[in-house]
Image (tube, rainbow, N blue to C red):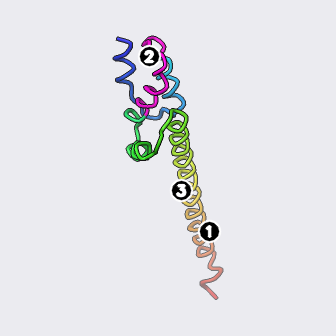
Amino acid sequence: MSRFKFFSRNQEQGETIDQFVTALRLLSQNCDFGDLTDSLIKDRIVCGIASNTVRDRLLRTDDLSLAKAVQVCEAAELSKEESRCIEGTSSEARVDAVNSRTEHEGRGSWRGR
């Protein structure tokens, strides 16, 4: 039953790679994998990662180790988060620009001249 839980564990929605790896490590403790533990956790990350894009990147990486897999996943998470921040900032800037222009038009500062 322990091995079934380990091999069927996938990354859940909103779960970080660190949380996913921790869950896999905890599940592997009762599986008696021995020296294969890190290799099987790496395989489970590749098979169970939520992002198809990251999975493709992992599959294209030569000599993929557990540490490399985690590093690739963390980099993808960071990149995704930074993209969200940039998109949020540019959206706020557009709203500010529209609000600023509307205020000027309302006062007639440049139109009436």
Q: Quadrant of residue 5?
A: top left
Query: Is the stretch drawn in magenta largely helix, strand or loop?
Result: helix
- Viewer-side residue, 109 vs 54: 54
Q: Is residue 90 left or right of residue 14?
A: right
x%, y% of residue 52? 38, 44
Q: Nearer the viewer, mark 2 or mark 1?
A: 2
Identify residue for label 2: 33
- Whether residue 11 is visible, yes or no, is no
In magenta, the rendered stretch is 28-45
Q: CA distance from mark 2 to mark 1?
A: 63 Å
Disc number for residue 68: none
Q: Please give the residue where the numbered disc 1 appears in the rendered image.
A: 100
Mark 2 secondary-structure assignment:
loop
Residue at position x 59%, y 68% from top? Answer: 97
Q: Residue 87, which numbered label?
A: 3
Badge 3 or badge 2: first in the primary sequence: 2
Amino acid tagged 1: Ser
Q: Is residue 72 above or below residue 43?
A: below
On whether residue 39 falls in the magenta region, the answer is yes
